Image: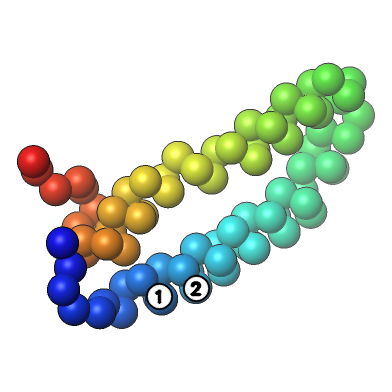
Amino acid sequence: MRDQPTWRIPAGIIGLFVVLMIYGVVIARYAPDLIGGWPTWAQTIVYIVLGVVWLLPLRRFLIWMETGSWSPPEK
């Protein structure tokens, strides 16, 4: 457990916000051009996947923000 403030938490929050904004803009800009002619059900699946895929690296990122290491601490 941390007993001193760390720069990683505010930097991580700002970095996460910036990366998610860039990701959202890229998806909003390019996805409609690529899948705009697809059936609605297929577009829905693609947007659900794209809406969830950013969560995959989030666990390791939050671990880094808290511990400074990319892997979880051993118990």
User: For the residue carrying disc 2, how many other residues have a C-alpha within 10 Å: few (<14), some (14-19), or many (20+)?
Assistant: few
State left or right for residue 28 relative to residue 63: right
Q: Are marks 1 and 2 in contact (CB under 8 Å)?
A: yes
* Amino acid on which the number 2 mark rests in the picture: Ile
Give the quarter of the image for residue 9. bottom left
Instruction: Where is residue 26? Give x, y as percent.
Output: 70, 55
- Above or below 57: residue 23: below
Q: Tell me what residue is drawn at x 63 percent, y 31 percent.
A: 49
Instruction: Where is residue 57? Give x, y as percent.
Output: 41, 45
What colour scheme does the image use? rainbow
Towards the viewer: 39 or 20: 20
State left or right for residue 23 relative to residue 36: left
Quarter of the figure that contains the N terminus? bottom left
* Amino acid on which the number 1 mark rests in the picture: Ala
Q: SS of the residue at dot 1?
A: helix
Q: Tell me what residue is drawn at x 72 percent, y 59 percent.
A: 25
User: For the residue carrying disc 1, how many other residues have a C-alpha within 10 Å: few (<14), some (14-19), or many (20+)?
Assistant: few
Quarter of the figure that contains the C terminus? top left
Please name the residue that numbered disc 2 is placed on. Answer: 14
Give the quarter of the image for residue 18. bottom right
Q: Tell me what residue is drawn at x 88 percent, y 35 percent.
A: 36
Q: Tell me what residue is drawn at x 27 percent, y 62 percent.
A: 66
Please name the residue that numbered disc 1 is placed on. Answer: 11
State left or right for residue 14 relative to residue 33: left
> What whole-number distance in Å separates the C-alpha atoms at marks 1 and 2?
5 Å
Instruction: Where is residue 61? Give x, y as percent.
Output: 36, 55
Q: SS of the residue at dot 2?
A: helix
Give the quarter of the image for residue 17. bottom right
- For this orientation, the residue located farthest to the left is 75
Instruction: Where is residue 48? Give x, y as percent.
Output: 69, 32
